[in-house]
Amino acid sequence: MRTFLLLLFFCSVVLSTSAFAVEPGAKAFVERGLSAYLTDGPDAAIKAWLKGSGMEGNTQALTQANSLRQIEDFYGKPESYDIVKENTISPRSVMVVFTINHAKGIVFGRFQVYRTKSGEWVATEFKFNTEAAVLLPPEMVFGKLP
């Protein structure tokens, strides 16, 4: 009986802590679009990120590709990317912050990713900016403030 209670306790601890772990699917979702961007350009990336979301087919959302093209006019083609931070907001929502490294500069990106009831990850919001302070929380840009 004591062994059963210990096992039950252990399982409940594991299950409760795993609910707060970052879901690897959210990061993979963002990375699929980033890989598409590096190989096939802004249109391919935006289409990959919008697939299955409420924004899929929305012409305003598709104009984000134009923003990425304008950045390329100044910074050159994208060369690589780095995932900077993932933060679980709720069991079905994750914020992913990343950078895109271009030939002459860096772009900061932020995605709010949501897991649907069917288990698919979709973008519910995303932004890009060349200024870290515009897009990221102050503690990420400036460190711990006094």
Image (tube, helix red, strand yellow):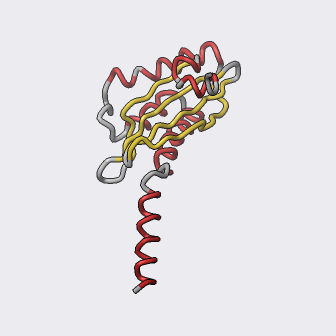
* Residue at x 46%, y 57% (from the top left corner): 17
Residue at 46% from the left image edge and 37% from the top image edge: 95
> Residue 92 in the image: x percent, y percent?
37, 47
Q: Relative to 9, does residue 122 appear above or below in the rendering?
A: above
Q: Position of residue 11 (x, y in %)?
A: 43, 70
Which residue occupies the extreme right position in the image? Answer: 104
Image quarter of residue 139: top right
**Residue 130 as seen in the image, left or right of residue 51:** right
Is residue 113 toward the left or the right of residue 38 in the image?
Answer: left
Count of numbered labels shown in the rendering: 0
Q: What quarter of the picture does the N terminus occupy?
A: bottom left
Relative height, residue 91 to residue 2 (above, below): above
| Foreground pick, 6 / 35 | 6
Question: Could you say where residue 94 lies in the image, as x and y percent from the top left?
Answer: 44, 41
Quadrant of residue 113 in the image?
top left
Q: Nearer the viewer, residue 98 or 59?
A: 98
Residue positioned most to the bottom? 1
Up/down of 102 relative to 120, above or below:
above
Residue for point 54% across, 29% down: 41
Image quarter hosting the C terminus: top right
Q: Is residue 51 above or below residue 5?
A: above
